[in-house]
Amino acid sequence: METINILENLSDMGCDERQTSSMKKLYEEGDKETLLRNLRQCRCHLMDELHDSQKKVDNMDYLIRQIQKEK
């Protein structure tokens, strides 16, 4: 798959339409340094969301264990 096709599918990776079009433009202009910085920022945001979700799962697991102990 060509890079430009991947950039067109950034919304599947959690980027909004504005980010997707901005990154596609950066690629077409050859500004790979800024493109990479933006991709890394998007990745960091996704990792933050992942960690938040993991905390919620951990709390849910804790609650389940506590209730099981009460049996």
Image: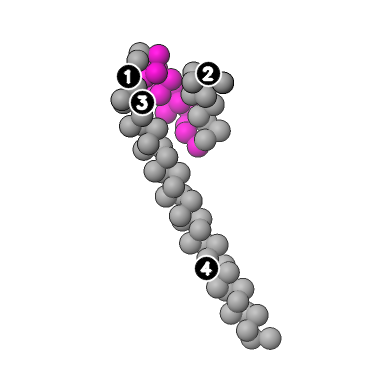
Q: Is residue 69 left or right of residue 31?
A: right
Q: On the image, numbered disc 2 is attached to which residue?
A: 2
Q: Residue 39: image x %, image y %? A: 40, 32
- Which callout, 1 or 2, points at the residue further toward the start of the chain? 2
Q: CA distance from mark 1 to mark 2?
A: 17 Å
The mark tally for this picture is 4
Q: Residue at x 41, y 43 (%)?
A: 45
The answer to the question of whether label 1 and label 3 lie on touching residues, with beta carbons closer than 8 A, is yes
Q: Quadrant of the C terminus?
A: bottom right
Name which residue type carries label 3.
Leu
**Residue 59's disc number:** 4
Name which residue type carries label 1.
Asp
Name which residue type carries label 4.
Asn
Q: Please name whichever residue, 56 or 47, is drawn nearer the observer in this view of the structure.
A: 47
Q: Could you tell me which secondary element the residue under label 1 belongs to?
A: loop
Q: Quadrant of the N terminus?
A: top right
Q: On the image, numbered disc 1 is attached to which residue?
A: 31
The answer to the question of whether label 4 and label 3 lie on touching residues, with beta carbons closer than 8 A, is no
